[in-house]
Image (cartoon, helix red, strand yellow):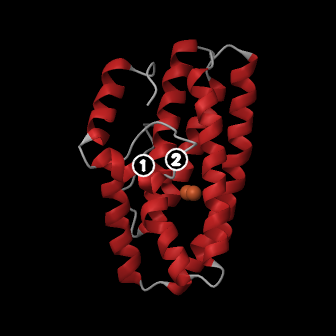
Amino acid sequence: MSASTDHSTDRDVIDVLVTDHREALELLEQIRGTADEEHRRDLTDSLIAELVRHSVAEEMHVYPAMRDHLPDGDEAVEHDTQEHKQLEATMKRLESADTTSAEYTTALSDLERVLRDHVSDEEQEQFPQLRQHLPEELLVELKGKVEATKKIAPTRPHPASPNAELFHKLVGPGVGLVDRLRDRITGRHENT
Ligand SMILES: [Fe+2]
Ligand SMILES: [Fe+2]
């Protein structure tokens, strides 16, 4: 990840998620700032992996808490999950597009638009409400769960399957780990 990555001051789950958002937006800036094709590919793959991990962890632990504790929780989760699927669909396009192609440029802009909108919804609306409605111990407990899930979550976008279901399927037989190791060995060429 980027050099500025720093989770050391994160106190609770909201801090972790907001730091993730900042990192993702920073990676986007870095992608836009580099002309080197290979570097662009690497940064794009990092962005995809980080966003997938983040989304899976949110869907596993944070969105259920939103459902349970926020006044309009069900509606918010529905909306946010839809946006995750849109993000994953654009990541699928980015995964296979040549970084010099028009297709890539369009997919990157689409990703940025959906991501900024999604981050703003979460940070302006759902996260402040979570802080308001959840006891601090629970927010801290969720931080641990989110961090643990991010370590073993899948790293590739799967726009067609629910992320929580996918996580259980992958992690059950240890495939999540295999997924990660394979990513490291083969780079970005395979799909799951
Ligand atoms: Fe998020
Ligand atoms: Fe999200």
Whether tag 1 and tag 2 are in contact, CB under 8 A, the answer is yes
Q: Nearer the viewer, residue 131 or 98?
A: 98
- What secondary structure is found at the residue carrying circle 1? helix
**Placement of the C terminus among the 4 image quadrants:** top left
- Residue 154, given in percent of the width and then of the height, sits at 39, 42
Q: Nearer the viewer, residue 18 or 94?
A: 94
Q: Is residue 60 above or below residue 48?
A: below
Residue at the image point whose x is 38% and y is 70% from the top: 142
Taking the image as shown, residue 10 lies to the left or right of residue 42, namely: left
| Figure quadrant of residue 188 | top left
- Residue 170, given in percent of the width and then of the height, sits at 33, 44
Task: Answer whether residue 55 is visible to the viewer in this image.
Answer: yes
- What secondary structure is found at the residue carrying circle 2? loop
- Residue, disc 1: 166
Q: Earlier in the sequence, mark 1 or mark 2?
A: 2
- Residue, disc 2: 161
- Residue 25, given in percent of the width and then of the height, sits at 60, 44
Q: Is residue 79 above or below residue 34?
A: below
Q: Nearer the viewer, residue 56 or 47?
A: 56
| Outermost left residue | 173
Residue at the image point whose x is 48% and y is 60% from the top: 58
**Placement of the N terminus among the 4 image quadrants:** top left
Q: Residues within 10 Å of mark 2 (few under 14, many from 20)?
A: few
